[in-house]
Every structure is written in structure tokens, then in C-alpha cells.
Amino acid sequence: MHIGPVLMNGRVTVGKDCSFHINTALVAGGTSDDVPYLEDGVVVGIGAVVLGNVHVARNVAIGANAVVNKNVAEENIAVAGVPAHKVSNGGGLNWNKNKLI
């Protein structure tokens, strides 16, 4: 999405067509070496962190500076905040439709 750092543990699983903004991190949580699993179409906003043994469903949009430390099981929603929680029904599918060309 932007030129800049994305920190990703080598064991993280990322599905197809995921998008990562600058300064994002997908990492192990705490003293555990468990890592995130992102399904297809996930959009990770600027500065967001996904940590630990969490599963993020298809087409979820993760807001800027969010901290995702629990599973996001519902597809095509938006989550934001610290800790991240559902903020709308407009997930990655809606985001892609609204992109400027």
C-alpha cells in the first residue's frame, strides 16, 4: 500500500489479496511464539498491530493503529481501537469498492 516498514514474523500465515499499510506488525504475542493467521482479502491500516494466536476472517478491514489481540470471526467487517473491536459492517470488500482510481 505504501513504501515503508511492515514487520511480520516468518511464521505468520497470510491469505490472498491482503493489503498492508505502512508501519504495521504481525507478530507473536508476549512470551508465546504463536502467530496470527489472516484469511483472504484482509486490509491492515497504518500502524496496526496483529499479535499472538489470532485468526482474522476474510475481508476484514483493520483500522489505523488498532491492536488486534483476539480472533475476528465475522467476515467483511471493520475493527478498530485498542483492543480492536467491531466498528462497522463495512469491511475489506466495501473498502476495495470505494478506492479512488
Image (tube, rainbow, N blue to C red):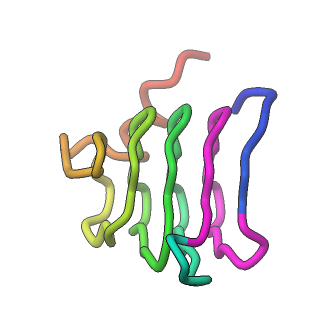
For the point 49% across and 73% down, the residue is 52
Which residue is painted at 25% across and 66% down in the image?
74
Quarter occupied by residue 4: top right
Q: Name the quadrant of the C terminus.
A: top right
Say if residue 39 shows up in the picture: no
Q: Which residue is at the front of the view, 82 or 11? A: 82
Region rendered in magenta:
9-28
Residue 13 place in picture, x, y as percent? 65, 75
Quadrant of the rendered image containing residue 70: bottom left
Q: Identify whether 36 is placed above or below 99.
A: below
Magenta-span inclusion, residue 22 = yes
Residue drawn at point x = 51 percent, y = 50 percent? 49
Query: Could you tell me residue 90's position as x and y percent?
Result: 27, 41
Relative to residue 95, is residue 15 drawn left or right?
right
Q: Is residue 8 above or below residue 34?
A: above
Residue farthest along the front direction in this orientation = 31
